[in-house]
Amino acid sequence: MILERVDLDHCPDLLRAALHRRRYDFVLERLPAGQDVLEIGTGPGAFARQLLPKCGSYTGVEYDPGTCVQAREKNPGAEIIEADARKLPFEESRFSFILCLEVLEHLGDWQAGVRNIHRERNAIRSCHCARWW
């Protein structure tokens, strides 16, 4: 697995930061208030901070232990767990809104990640994925 981290608070690449913010705005505009949100690939927690006020509940999943710690530090009280997107440790259909932004291309076996997302997704709710390729 290849890890890529973008911390919008400390990103020297203004174009990269702007593209990330556009994706975040796109999702925030479509996130109904009060949803049970699963964010797969929290990174250092920049987007979690924006999601939390709008969520009914929030759970973040991060593969890298050090980055998981950073995300927890930025988002006290948020449930952010260390886990692999290819083997999500949740009950089926627990979440009503799932985010997986720029994660699949880093998984190696991205199909396993998609299968797990599909297993977690409640059929009447929403799932937003984005990738570069």
Image (cartoon, grey):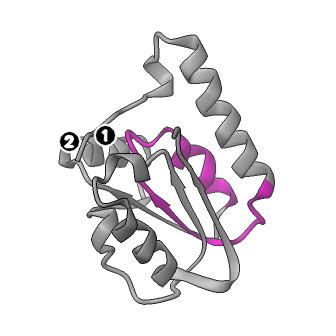
Left of 6 or right of it: where is 4? Answer: left
Residue at the spot of label 1: 70
Secondary element under disc 2, as helix, strand or loop, is helix
Residue positioned 50% across, 26% down in the render: 8
Amino acid type, label 2 = Gly
Amino acid type, label 1 = Gln
Residue positioned 34% across, 46% down in the render: 106
Residue at the spot of label 2: 66
**Distance from the alpha carbon under mark 1 to that under mark 2:** 7 Å
Residue 49 on the magenta segment: yes
Residue positioned 37% across, 82% down in the render: 90
Q: Is residue 41 above or below residue 3?
A: below
* Magenta span of residues: 30-54
Left of 69 or right of it: where is 79? Answer: right
Q: Viewer-proximal residue, 53 or 7?
A: 7
- In the rendering, at what x and y percent does residue 88 appear? 33, 74
- In the rendering, at what x and y percent does residue 7 appear? 43, 28
Binning the other alpha carbons within 10 Å of mark 2 as few (below 14), some (14 to 19) or many (20 upward) gives: few
Q: Is residue 35 above or below residue 100?
A: below
Marks 1,2: beta carbons within 8 A:
yes
- In the rendering, at what x and y percent does residue 99 appear? 56, 59
- In the rendering, at what x and y percent does residue 33 appear? 76, 66
